[in-house]
Amino acid sequence: MTLKISSLEVGYGKRQVVKGANLTVEKGELIGLLGSNGSGKSTLIKTIAGINSQTKGTITWNGDTDLTRLARKDLARIVAYVPQSIGLSFGLDIREAVLLGRTPYFGTRPRDEDWAHVDAAMERMGLDELGDRAVTELSGGQGQRVLIARALAQDPQILLLDEPTSALDIRYQWQTLEVARDVTRKNNVAAVIAIHDLNQAARFTDRVVFLQDGVVIAEGRPAEVYSPELIKRVYGVDVELSTHKGFVQVHPLSEHGHAQLGLQPATSEPVRAPRLAEQREYATA
Amino acid sequence: MSSVHSDPLHPVAPSGRRRSTDLYTSQKLAIALGFAAVVITALIGIRIGTSGATLLDVLQTFWSKISGTVPTDRATLLKHNVIWELRLPRVLLAILGGAALAVAGVLFQGLLRNPLVSPYTLGIAPAAAFGASLAIVLFGATAGSAAISLVIGALLFSFLNTALVLSLASTRNLHATTLILVGIALSQLFGALTACIQYFAEDEVLAAIVRWTWGSVNNSAWYQVLALFVLLALAFPYIRFRSSALNAIAFAGDDSAKSLGVAVSQVRLQTIAIAATLTAVTIAFTGIIGFVGLVAPHIARLVVGANHRFLIAFSAIIGALLLVIADAVGRLVINPGVIPVGIIDALVGAPIFLYLILTRQKAIE
């Protein structure tokens, strides 16, 4: 099963943001969308999720399903979207926040089947013992797990993550990316993640796609596609590359390069995120 | 990482842990108890007044109206008429008006994703006040809010304001924050127009306008009760049907709600139209009652949680209770005089609200 995007154009008013993008994603594959701010990463993800509707081109799933023509509810049964942060105005408890993922499936009253999906998604994300807590009480990393659990409860075949690590500290960035990769593999979904950090993308994604001004300019496995010339062209930063534990690593040559590339200062030996079981103990203490 | 369910289509509930269910027993119990409280306070409210009335009188009045029998005793007939023509519509208008404003408050707070908004955020109250003021100036509607010209004036400008907001929202695809700002601009505009009328008005007209803005159920009439009842009866099934979509908009935001299969623009426009209509019709009958639409949803959230499936009904109950109690207190304090319900509502409600905020700060935050 393949997600196939062909000649996709998306704009806001007269401004074209995505200009003829082509992309394929296989089931069980995690694709990293890279590019500087304003390159069209979020727009592309929101378009696949059906949030942006003013589009040209096609987005197909499994060859014959044109996602741009599906009714909103039908699309939501195939595609799940994880935003940057949970950003709540009022506090639902975690169980009800995950239940939002079942919105495309039930009318007014959730069925037993919907609750079963909620339980499964919560256990999958290590949230099952926190169910009665208000979402507003959670840490950034826990909040991100709630959002991913919500997406899993949606029972999707395509998972889209829009810079899910941008509001998190390094420990939880690492954990969220581990979870995204794990979910992609074990739930066998086609996944696309917009991400800033080139080194994290190299470590966690199967392939990367570089966007510049709404155009795909490079695509492939990180080790094959990363080059000082490409990174200079996209970000305007001089870098050199190395390999650490089998992953390509980017090292900026200038003082401000880390910030410009969205890199964490120490990427060769990242801080280990607490395992979900450890967090459960901490959270319920 | 905890264990993984290999088949996401047929998940199995976690073994040995509490399984999620759809019981919501405490919420359902709260709604049942709240409904009973509304009935009891209404019966008490009907009894309050200078001519006095026992519970038996109230029940006898109901029975005589249902059975069509007319009391032969003149004093009983008078008492029945006072209950039927004055007290019952008054209490029912307080119940339905309080419920309507509270439901509108919940809807606006959820749709605009802002706990500080009220039914008046989009400028409906200043628009209604301008319409009422204009009617008072043009037609001398000093008899009070029952005067039909005053009701029509308030309704007309409320709907004009709402139509303006909705047409801007639909044609310009406005987001929640922009809608709130549009409401602020319209509030200022209509507020300034009303101030112009007040500035040039005679003392009597000025007094009538100010009296209207206090908000009261003193001039209740059966047609008002019927109109609000029909509106609420029509609105409730739709709102309940949309409760999961409202949850998605309120708790996930526009983008995520769309990705969850919700037609956000359509739901927002339809629901704002309903909330605005409930508000406009209520304040056309009662004048501006400012506190209940903001506070009732917050009190309700503390009791039944934030899920709109239960929150809407329980907010309606809290709104009804707040206004019925405020009206009863307003009639008791300077008996036989009456303090308008809008004033008492804020005087009684604000300390209760403060107490809840301070004692349950965590739950609110």
Image: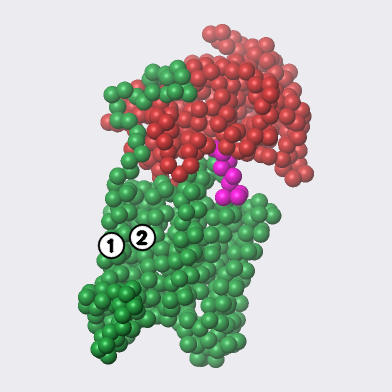
Chain colours: A red, B green
Q: Is residue B167 magenta?
A: no
Q: Is residue B104 above or below residue B131?
A: above
Residue toward you, A178 or B293: B293
Report the span colored magenta.
B258-267
The image quadrant of residue B329 is bottom left
Q: Nearer the viewer, residue B159 or B64?
A: B64
Q: Chain of mark 2?
A: B
Report helix, strand or loop for mark 1: helix
Q: Is residue B261 magenta?
A: yes
Residue at horizontal 76%, vertical 28%? A7
* Residue type for callout 1: Ala
Residue appearing at x 57%, y 29% in the figure: A78
Q: Which residue is mark 2?
A: B317
Mark 2: amino acid: Ile
Reading the chain from its start, which is encountered first: label 1 or label 2?
1
Residue A165 visible to an observer of this rendering: no
Marks 1 and 2, how far apart at CA: 9 Å
Q: Secondary structure beneath disc 2? A: helix
Q: Is the stretch drawn in magenta largely helix, strand or loop?
A: helix
Quarter placement of the C terminus of chain A: top left
Using the rendered view, name the quadrant where residue A32 is placed.
Answer: top right
- Mark 1 belongs to which subunit? B
Task: Name the quadrant containing residue A56.
Answer: top right
Number of numbered discs overlaid on the protein picture: 2
Would you name the residue on which mark 1 appears?
Answer: B37
* Neighbourhood count class around disc 1 (C-alpha, 10 Å): few under 14, some 14–19, many 20 upward: some
Q: Is residue A156 above or below residue A12?
A: above
Residue shown at 64%/64% (left/top)?
Answer: B164
Q: Are marks 1 and 2 in contact (CB under 8 Å)?
A: yes
Residue A47 seen in render: yes
